Image (spheres, rainbow, N blue to C red):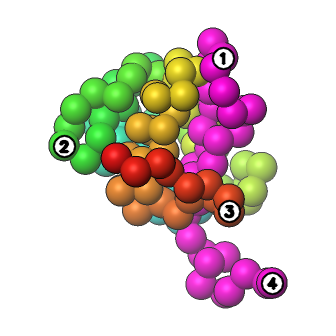
Amino acid sequence: MRPSSESLLDTIAALATPLGRSAIAVVRLSGDRTRSILAAIAPQLPRDAEPRRPHLVTLVDGAGDAIDRGLVTLFAAPASYTGEDLAEISVHGSPAVVEELLRALIAAGARPAAGFRPPPA
């Protein structure tokens, strides 16, 4: 099945490292809404964050509760892997942390990558 033209314009969140316990997990966020979604989940990130420079921030959910402290690295369009604004978010590799981060990204407007189904809250 081919993706719809609308889904090609979505901002997508996806785990970029293997699922499971690890020291570090990397979640990627890619699409036009990358910066606005980052503003919601990483309020400490400067609005004019320098591309390709990691920024240590507290990541929060929709209620403002801390999920984890992690590194957010922004890759500005068109100089990114996808050609769109893209962010790599490095957090502790606990499955619970990764799950909460993905939930927060989705709640802030990202679409989960194909195959991701968050467990019930």
Distance between the alpha carbons at the discs numbered 3 and 2? 26 Å
Decide if residue 25 is on the left or right side of residue 1: left
Q: Do the residues labelled 1 and 2 touch (CB within 8 Å)?
A: no
Please tell me in which quadrant of the rendered image residue 26 appears: top right
Residue 102 lies in the magenta stretch: no
Residue 70 seen anywhere in this rendered image of the structure: yes
The spot of residue 118 in percent (x, y) is 50, 51
The spot of residue 14 in percent (x, y) is 63, 48
* Comes first in the chain, label 4 or label 3: 4
Residue at x 35% of width, y 28% of height: 67
* Comes first in the chain, label 4 or label 2: 4
Within 10 angstroms of label 3, few (less than 14), some, or many (20 or more) residues? few
Distance between the alpha carbons at the discs numbered 1 and 4? 34 Å
* Comes first in the chain, label 1 or label 4: 4
Secondary structure found at label 2: loop
Secondary structure found at label 3: loop
Residue that numbered label 4 is attached to: 1
Query: Which numbered dot is residue 114?
Result: 3
Q: Foreground mark, 4 or 2?
A: 4
Within 10 angstroms of label 2, few (less than 14), some, or many (20 or more) residues? few
Decide if residue 67 is on the left or right side of residue 73: left
Foreground residue among 77 and 10: 10
Distance between the alpha carbons at the discs numbered 1 and 2? 27 Å
Please tell me in which quadrant of the rendered image residue 60 appears: top left
Q: What residue type is labelled 3?
A: Ala
Within 10 angstroms of label 4, few (less than 14), some, or many (20 or more) residues? few
Distance between the alpha carbons at the discs numbered 3 and 1? 22 Å
Residue that numbered label 1 is attached to: 22
Q: What residue type is labelled 1?
A: Ser
Q: Do the residues labelled 4 and 2 touch (CB within 8 Å)?
A: no
| Region in magenta | 1-29
